[in-house]
Each structure stands twice: as C-alpha cells, then as structure tokens.
Amino acid sequence: MFDEGQLYSPVTTDADGRVEVHLGADHPGLNDPAYRARRGQIAAAALSWRPGEAVPTIAYSAQEDEVWHIACRELAPKHERYAHSEYLFGKDALALPEERVPQLAEVSARLQPLTGWGYVCAPGLVGLREFYGSLGDRVFHSTQYLRHPSQPLYTPEPDVIHEVVGHANQLASPRFARLTQAAGAATQRLESDAAVKVVADVFWFSMEFGVMWEGPALKAYGAGILSSYGEMDAFSHMQIRPLDLHQMATIPYDITTYQSVLFAARNLDELEEVVGGFFDTVDDDAAHRLLGAHAHA
C-alpha cells in the first residue's frame, strides 16, 4: 500500500501565474536552477492543456534528447536479457525513436493502429480515480519532463522515459493493453476510494512491478522494472511469490527503494486469468472482502 503522491514532485502556481515544481531534498536537480526552471516550463504547458485539445509539443533540447538516448541505449541490452517476450513484441511493434525524445502525440500515433491507446499530458500527479479511470478509455496520462542529466539512468519520480519506455512499449501488446484497460474499467464502476486503491495496488504489483516465468527463466513485464536500469539487475534476487490478490492488495511497500517482494505469474495465461479476471469482475464488495481476506497458502 502506498500514497501515490509520494511518486511525483508537487506542482504549484503562485499569484503571478508562475508554475513551480517542488523537487525533493534528494532530487539530483534540486540545486540546478536551469533544470528547475525547465521543469516549471514543462509543467506549465501541461497545466494549460485541456481535454480535447492537441497535446502540447515540447521543444526538447539537445541535452534532453541525449538523456533519452543514453537511457534507451543502456536499457536495450537489459531488455533483451530480462524482459518477457510479450514486452519485447510490443517494443518491436512500437519502434520508438531512440536518439530523441518522442512527442506524446507521436507515441499516440504509433499506438493507435496497434491497440487503440493514446497519451495525454500531465504536469505530475494525477489523482488515482482520474488516472485509472482514464485507462478504461485507453487514455494514458503521462509526464513530459526528463530526469536530471547528471543521472540519465536514475530518476526518483516517473518521467517521460518511465511513462513511454516502460508503459507505451507495454501498451503496444494487445494482451497487456487489455489488462491495463480492464483496470481502468474496474475503476470506472467502483464507488469507494478504498476499492479503487485495491485496484491500484494490484496494478502496482502486476503492470508496474510484475514478473513472469518464461520457461525456466524469471522475466520482467512491469513498466517500473523495465524502465529502471538498476531494478532489472535486482529483481530476480528479490523475494518472489506466486500471484496472490490479497497480498498484492495489502502488502506494505516502499516506492523509494527497489521492490523487495514481487509476484510472479506462471505464464501470460495465468496473469490474464488471475489479474485480468480480478479487474474484469471486481466490485466494491469484492474489493472490501479482499482487504479482509486471509492470504491463502
């Protein structure tokens, strides 16, 4: 269980209309005025956007393109080694540019013919109900900023590399795209915030930090693992448990460190049956029963 507000730097607008992103004390860009100003500029573009409008185009700098390029270059061999074949199938189909940051409109144009998904912009945190509810309409809210250039392989918060390299490649797979949409459809029909939180936590341990057996090898399919250079080396050494919806909905976890407990599906069919079946059928009563259930052996 977690507070999603921890994931994103708060964004405020002062009386003069100046948008400021409040970076955490451990953020690599905290003492970089140019980076902080750039973050404010990108957040302001997202704040001014309204649904139905074209997503703002960000004129990325050569330095920002280089951060994207370094991340893609370094993640690629790790994807080949650690990613589940279904993710690699989606990545190959989407064929994102690796030498420059793609615009969100470009990501949408590539996804639409594959799975019907599209991207819209977010300045930072989007509320759980809005974010997950939009997934039911095949809409993904994404940040547009990049991590600090001093650490191109690390970010303390979800940036466009996480949102696109992690999630868009995943959403280019029809099977992963359907699972994600099912989580959104569940959110749309749930009434209580506690039930929405259950869906979000199961999503966290599946589409964000899920692993899956592929033959004798443990592979990653979660966007949070596959967009993290360090986490891909670490995940196989964590405590690996079988899929357990009660545990996935209730286990405490820390978003600031590598995940110490991961839940592995035996295969994609089991993932669709257990997690997809849960998303397809969960209602408020079922979610509350799950919170109070005893974990099965």
Image: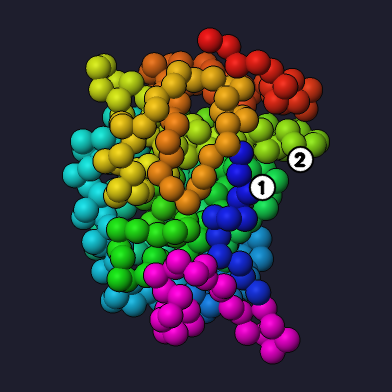
Residue holding disc 2: 193
Quarter that holds the N terminus: top right
For mark 1, give the secondary structure.
Answer: helix
For residue 118, above or below residue 17: above
Q: Type of residue at label 1?
A: Leu
Q: How many marks?
A: 2
Question: Is residue 21 inside the magenta stretch?
Answer: yes
* Mark nearer the N terminus (2 vs 1): 1
Q: Residue at x 80, y 36 (%)?
A: 191
Q: Residue at x 41, y 53 (%)?
A: 162
Question: Is residue 65 inside the magenta stretch?
Answer: no
Which region shows up in magenta?
13-38
Label annotation for residue 128: 1
Place of residue 62 in the rendered image (x, y in percent of width and height, measured from the top left): 28, 76
Q: Type of residue at label 2?
A: Asp
Q: Is residue 231 visible?
A: yes
